[in-house]
Image: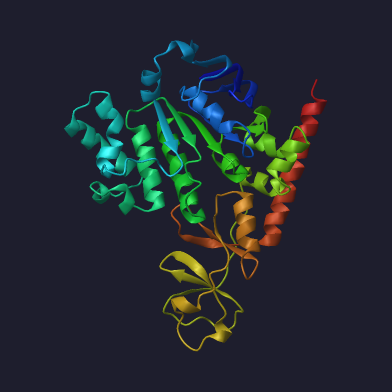
Amino acid sequence: MITFEAVTKRFDDGTVAVDDLSLVVPTGRITVFVGPSGCGKTTTLRMINRMIEPTSGRILIDDEDTASMDAAQLRRNIGYVIQHAGLFPHRTVLDNIATVPRLLGTKRGPAREQALTLMERVGLATGLANRYPAQLSGGQQQRVGVARALAADPPIMLMDEPFSAVDPIVREQLQAEFLRLQDELGKTIVFVTHDIDEAVTLGDQVAVFAVGGVLAQMDTPVALLDNPTDDFVADFVGRDRGFRALGFTSAHVSPGRAPTVHLGEVARADAPWVVVLDGDRPVGWVEPHRLDGPVTAPVVHRGGTIARVDGSLRGQLDAALSSPTLQGLLVDEEGRYAGVVEADRVLAAIEAANRGSQAQDEARNEAP
């Protein structure tokens, strides 16, 4: 557990970056710091490992004041991941990951063996082990950065906008991989981002900072979206926060049926749209009346996202609304085609979920 007790950081020019901050980062959970530029979230993060020293107040890790700890030893016991990965350009992937274990006295052979294991854990092919950072994509570099931070098996990890420099598709993949790792490892993680979508996707709790280093609200993602504490938080979370909140509501809509065709087959002519499958996986739609032969990849309409049948109402609604047929394509947990869902059925499910939530609130209010 990390505890901030009335922490203030005032720089020499008089700028107050963090103002009288008190909060608790629980053990084994992800706490996300989010807010506009200049709100003190990165300064707050860097005070945890004493890369920046607080002007006043205390920061405790498991009830021990970090000011009483050796700074170098403190940092070696805390994983740190930054934007652009911060890798050593002259070291191979393997040696980058093995950096901290080597500093802690692990021999080169065992450190490299551990690094290979970590590469697999973060989704990196071990064939990349002897490459240098410049030979990797941005997403691969970020995975190396995460592996390096995990190398000494630290109980705490600090992550400063680690995924902001990669494209949206890679970013979503990294977020999913990050959550998978956290399910396995259960680290205490402080994650900084300026992106509210990333914050509510990753965080067990979210701390919204206002300019001047003031904590505006700290809450679960659901509570933050449902009940912003003031106009600043409401504006920062955004006008579409109701849509974001659907991401935390499980969908219970049975998949419907639609005509299907496999790549290389001829689509039935009596349907305006037909689902195209590649094996057992959906890839999009076709309009049979526009075809003069078998379905091939170039003629597939790939508009529309694909949602999990056991996923969220947000995912299913987005899939339906972005589809050319207003029918979202649904898959099971293995990515296999499960059916379709119409937008109006998802909207009906949203209405039913809201009625259920209101009924629960009324029951709680009437309870003695």
Q: How many numbered callouts?
A: 0
Front in this rendered view, residue 169 or 357: 169
Query: In the current view of this chain or complex, which residue is farthest to the front?
Result: 13
Query: In the current view of this chain or complex, which residue is farthest to the bottom?
Result: 292
Which residue corresponds to the image point at 41% horizontal and 51% vertical from the top-left? 138
Q: Where is residue 135 in the image (x, y as percent from the top left)?
A: 31, 53
Q: Quadrant of the C terminus?
A: top right
* Image-based side of 150 in relation to 13, left or right: left
The answer to whether residue 356 is above or below residue 10 is below
| Residue 252 seen in the figure | no
Q: Where is residue 94 in the image (x, y as percent from the top left)?
A: 25, 41
* Image-based side of 160 in relation to 4, left or right: left
* Image-based side of 104 in relation to 232, left or right: left
Front in this rendered view, residue 28 or 67: 67
Question: Residue 213's quadrant in the figure?
Answer: top right
Front in this rendered view, residue 199 or 358: 199
Front in this rendered view, residue 339 or 308: 308
Q: Position of residue 306 (x, y in %)?
A: 54, 60
Which residue corresponds to the image point at 36% horizontal and 19% vertical from the top-left? 73
Question: Residue 111's quadrant in the figure?
Answer: top left
| Residue 174 seen in the figure | yes
Q: Where is residue 143 in the image (x, y as percent from the top left)?
A: 38, 44
Which residue corresponds to the image point at 52% horizontal and 86% vertical from the top-left? 291
Query: In the current view of this chain or complex, which residue is farthest to the right?
Result: 366
Which residue corresponds to the image point at 38% horizontal and 26% vertical from the top-left? 154
The answer to whether residue 340 is above or below residue 171 is below
The answer to whether residue 117 is above or below residue 272 is above
